[in-house]
Amino acid sequence: DSGVTQTPKHLITATGQRVTLRCSPRSGDLSVYWYQQSLDQGLQFLIQYYNGEERAKGNILERFSAQQFPDLHSELNLSSLELGDSALYFCASSFRPGGYEQFFGPGTRLTVL
Amino acid sequence: SQQGEEDPQALSIQEGENATMNCSYKTSINNLQWYRQNSGRGLVHLILIRSNEREKHSGRLRVTLDTSKKSSSLLITASRAADTASYFCATDEGGSRLTFGEGTQLTVNP
């Protein structure tokens, strides 16, 4: 158990819908990262937050957004869902950005029908 | 984009044998991290090696890093059936985002 929690574990929804994925980092970690894992793209970095502020953006679609709250938990919002958004979404956390281990949560498996 | 490339893509060995996986990358890095993923589940952090380190050990794991060749290797000694998983290398170029390779699927046969 990495100490990073993610909810829900599974999510099945329809095209065009909007969903919210939630992540709680390990106790003491200030930085949160979101990654997407799909069969065709592999593991891709989406976005990073540090102490409530957006720090870096990767291949995140405009239909996706995220935020980190004062209690350091983070949410990833996916809207206007398409079939191709079906994937495993991971949250990871680290003490700080810059050279620290990133510990991953169990992931949320999103299926868009 | 994939920074790291693991080699081989798949590896099948018998219990008790050693398993070696290689990772190559393209740009300068701050550190390189190895992860294990059991089928469709979460990523388990194995080891982090910094750019100024050449070798690191953790239990049955040994990781080497050659920054001049932009490559790293993960050695698992005395493998067990429970080591069956996908293994990924991930590079941190200093911005903290990790860039993952495509992984090596290791199968350890009892």
Image (spheres, coloured by chain):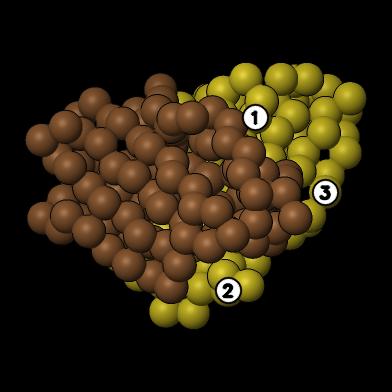
Relative to A91, is A21 on the left or the right? right
Judging from the image, mark 1 belongs to the subunit labelled A
Q: Are marks 3 and 1 on the same chain?
A: yes
For residue B53, above or below residue B13? below
Identity of the residue drawn at 52% across and 35% down:
B103
Chain B painted colour: brown
The image quadrant that residue A87 belongs to is: top right
Mark 3 neighbour density, 10 Å: few (under 14) some (14–19) many (20 or more): few
Residue type, label 2: Gly
- Camera-near label (3 vs 1) is 1
Q: Secondary structure at mark 2?
A: loop
Which residue position holds label 1?
A: A38
Chain A painted colour: yellow
Which residue position holds label 2?
A: A3
Q: Quadrant of the N terminus of chain B?
A: top left
Which residue position holds label 3?
A: A10
Identity of the residue drawn at 41% across and 53% down:
B75
Looking at this view, is A92 or A19 the one in front? Answer: A92
